[in-house]
Amino acid sequence: MLGGTYFVIAILALAVIFLMKAVKVVPQGHVYTVERFGRYTHSLMPGLGIITPFIDSIGSKVNMMETVLDVPSQEVITRDNAMVKVDGVVFYQVLDAAKASYEVNNLKIAVLNLVMTNVRTVMGGMDLDQLLSQRDSINARLLTVVDEATHPWGLKVTRIEIKDIAPPRDIIDSMARQMKAEREKRAAILEAEGQRQSAILSAEGKKQAAILEAEGRREAAYRDAEARERQAEAEAKATQVVSDAIAGGNVQALNYFVATRYVDALKAVATAPNQKLVLMPLEAANVIGALGGISELARDAFGGGGDGTKRAAAPRGSVPPVSGD
C-alpha cells in the first residue's frame, strides 16, 4: 500500500517535470531557437510552444524588436589631414533569429565594430568641409554599407545617425574667422550693389528730369514763338489799318501810331534793369504833346471835336503832327 503511494507520487513528479520541459511560453517580441541534441531544428514564435523534453532544448532567446546601439566617440582623420571626433547611433532589427544566433558570435559587438570601421572608412575619404555640410550623405552611405554587410546575419539596419562631429579648437577658430570674413565680404558686396542701384536710379531720375525740362523748354519756345507770331500779326494788322486810314486822308491815325511807339520806347528805357544813366534831349512838353495828339484823335473818333476837317494846332515837341495838305 505504501509502495503504491510512492509510485503514484513519483509518476506525478515526473509528469510535472515533463510538462515543464515540454511547454515553453515565448513573450511578444522574442523568438526562441530549438536545438535537438545541439543542432538547430526550428524556432518558437511568441505564445505557447511545445518541445520534446530531454531531447529538445532552447538554444537562444532572440529579441526581435528594433534595438538602439550607441557608437562611442572615435577620432577620424579626414582627407585633408584634419582630425575630428565622431560619435553616432545605429538602429537595427533582427529578421531571422536562426541566422542572428548561429551566423555571428556576440551580435551587438559585431554590429558596433562594423559601424565604427565604416565610419572611419567613409569619413576618412572626405574633406572637413564635406563632413560638416554633408551629414545626410554620410548617414546614407553608412546605412547602405552596413546594411549590406549585416544581411547574412539576418539583420536589418534601419538607420545610422552621426550625432556629433567635433573638430580641434584651432580649426574651430579658423572656421570662425573664415565665416566672419565671408560675412563681411557679402556685406561689402551688398553695400556696393546698393550704391550701384542708387546711382542707376539717380541717373535715371536726372535723365527723366532733363527730358522733362527739355520738353518744357520746347513747349515754352513753341508758345513764345506762337505769341510773337500773333503779336507780329497784330502789329501788321495795326500797321495796315493805319496805312488804310492815311490813304483815306485821316492823318490823325498816323499821329496816334507814332505817339504810341514813342510812349512805349520811353517805358522801355525807364524800366530797364541796368544801372546806367541815360542822357537824352527829352522835354516833358514833347510827351504831353504826344498825349494831346492821342486825345485829339479820340475826340475826332467819337465826334466830340466838331467836323472831321478841323485840325488842332500842333503842340510843341519832338513828335509833330503830320499835315494832310
Image (spheres, helix red, strand yellow):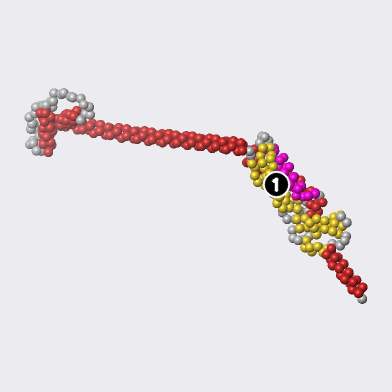
Is residue 37 depicted above or below 205 in this figure? below
The residue that appears at 71% across and 42% down in the rendered structure is: 119
**Quarter of the image holding residue 149?**
top right
The answer to whether residue 94 shows anywhere in this view is yes
Specify start and end residues of the magenta stretch as a single range: 104-127
Image location (x, y in percent) of residue 109: 76, 48
Asked whether 84 or 48 is in front, the reply is 84
Residue at the spot 80% in from the left edge and 52% down from the top edge: 101
Point 76% across, 58% down: residue: 30
Q: Nearer the viewer, residue 204 or 93?
A: 93
Query: Is label 1 in a helix, a strand or a loop?
Result: strand
**Residue 306's spot in the image, x, y percent?**
7, 36
| Residue 207 x/y as whole percent | 41, 34
Horizontal and vertical percent for residue 114?
75, 45
Residue on which the image places disc 1: 71
Q: In front here: 244 or 128?
A: 128
The N terminus: image quadrant = bottom right
Look at the image and tell me whether residue 324 can be seen: no
Q: Is residue 32 above or below residue 171?
A: below
Q: Residue type at mark 1?
A: Val
